[in-house]
Image (cartoon, helix red, strand yellow):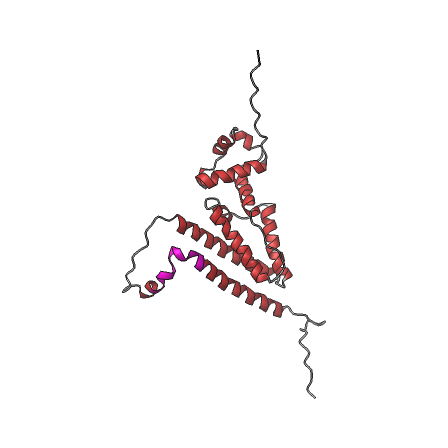
Amino acid sequence: MRSPAKPRPRERLSPDAIAVAALGLIDRDGLEMLSMRRLGEVLGVEAMALYHHFPSRAALLDAVSERLIGEIDMPGTSGDVVAWLGEVVRRYVALADRHPEAFPLLATRRFNTVAAFGFVERVVGRLIAAGASPELAADIFRGLGAFANGTALAGIAVRQSTVAPAVLDASHLPNVARVAPWLGPEHVERLFASSLGMFLDGVALRLERGRAASGPRRKGGKKVGKIREKRR
């Protein structure tokens, strides 16, 4: 008589496997549905088993944020820095299309992991290498972050909205009525491209001013100007 087959052992848990499962749960059911108990059910383990890898839900959310950041395929660093920044922003915002339920983690939580700070390091490092001061690099990074997060969250809200557009009374709001045709949800992509272009124009100007202000100096602090040939 054959002995009964032994139960198939579960795959060994790891922080990475748990984070992948957590992201999948958020994508399917929403961020508010993520709990250690629910995630344990998905993985087929007791919730306490997860606490051996993550001491809290907050630590787990940091790991999910890290996975999202890891999905960004950073462009090569050759070429114009402003064009490079634009491509980084596009790839960052694209995360909101792939993970609309999880993206708010990036937009609303402070970076708190090595991978997340690695992303910051690459962006500000590229700016400093292009001649930006540390202060200017920080300003540009913060500004681009606010723009990218706001744009991505607005896009999620537009795509998920079920509210019909308001009917405007042009006699009371004449200027709003005039621009309204270009503010509708069908123009989200165009508005993003246009707004990003305007922001990057400002970045280019600030970088140029920063380079001019920190140009080469002689001993004693005086700037080295261009040498002009005397006319004979």
**Which residue shows up at 50% across the image and 55% down it?**
148
Magenta run includes residue 189: yes
Q: Quadrant of residue 125?
A: bottom right
Inspect this view and state whether residue 179 appears: yes
- Magenta region: which residues? 178-191
Residue 110 in the image, given as x and y percentages of width and height: 53, 48
230 relative position to 153: left or right: right
160 relative position to 106: left or right: left
Inspect this view and state whether residue 54 appears: no
**Which residue shows up at 46% across the image and 44% down it?**
101
> From the viewer's perspective, is residue 220 above or below residue 110?
below
The number of numbered discs placed on residues in the rendered structure image is 0
125 relative position to 68: left or right: right
Report the predominant secondary structure element of the magenta stretch: helix
Residue found at the far front of this picture: 1
* Foreground of the two, 206 or 56: 206
> From the viewer's perspective, is residue 114 above or below residue 128?
above
Residue 144 in the image, given as x and y percentages of width and height: 52, 57
